[in-house]
Amino acid sequence: MAELIDLLLHVDRYLVDLIANYGVWIYAILFLIVFAETGLVVTPFLPGDSLLFATGALAATGALDLWLSVTLLLTAAIAGDAVNYSIGRSAGLRVIELSRTDPRWRRWINPEYIARAHEFFERRGGKAIVLGRFMPIVRTFVPFVAGVAEMSYPAFALYNVTGALAWVGICVGAGYLFGNVPIVKNNFSFVAIGIVIVSVLPMVVEYLKYRSAGRASSS
């Protein structure tokens, strides 16, 4: 757990080390991380927003090719959600049941995360796929829930592409523009925490609205 937290807070340093050690293979590594974080329900803990931000910052220094990075990250994000949707559509109910009854599955798939994503999807529908892109953990489970709910694939694909364009564009763009500002570069761990806080704000707002609506209807 400590290593995971360190990775999330200092993903910029890890990325620099990966570039130094693996050279051009860094692009394949970036693709695989984003694909796994969005496409596999067992890896919601991988870095997402902070990784994209750090990628943009390093692209601004010339350490990474900006357009190649953006193209690969977009492809990974779209393909990851598509695979996650397919898993949810074909085996979602069985996976959810196993996560509730089998401790071995529960270690990898937390039923609470699925329930949270399902509740968000029910309230927001297709928009949840776009908004969920910006929420750690939720973004891993929303496409899975969309598959379980048998959302039509053309509609899902539209929101999938739209959300990926917004997520990658905003996060990488912010890193490219602001990642090398001295106060940002020298305090990346605080920036990473800030990114997470900003990312979960929409979910908190939605939850508060949901609670307020529930109290109003019961009174």
Image (cartoon, rainbow, N blue to C red):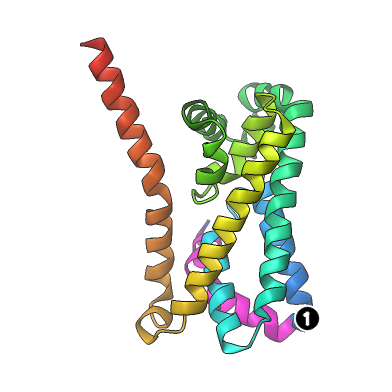
Q: Residue at x 52, y 77 (%)?
A: 176
Residue drawn at x 55%, y 57% as measured from the top left: 167
Considering the whole magenta stretch, tell me its main secondary structure. helix
Q: In this view, does 86 lie to the left or right of 120?
A: right
**Image coords of residue 211 (percent x, y):** 30, 26
> 162 above or below 193?
above
- Stretch in magenta: 2-21
Q: Residue furthest top?
A: 218
- The amino acid type found where label 1 is placed reads Val
Q: How crowded is mark 1: few (under 14 residues within 10 Å), some or many (20 or more)?
A: few
Tell me residue 34's x, y (percent): 67, 58
Considering the numbered disc 1 on the image, is that residue within a helix, a strand or a loop?
Answer: helix
Instruction: Inspect this view and state whether residue 41 appears.
Output: no
Q: Mark 1 points at which residue?
A: 24
Q: In the image, is 43 to the left or to the right of 90? A: left
Asked if 147 appears above or below 195 in the picture, the reply is above
Q: Nearer the viewer, residue 151 or 26?
A: 151
Which quadrant holds the C terminus?
Answer: top left
Residue 198: which quarter of the image?
bottom left
Q: Position of residue 195 (x, y in %)?
A: 42, 61
Q: Is residue 73 left or right of residue 171?
A: right
Counting from the top left corner in percent of width and height, residue 81 is at 69, 45
Residue at image coords 73%, 33%? 153
Instruction: Tell whether position 208 is magenta.
Output: no
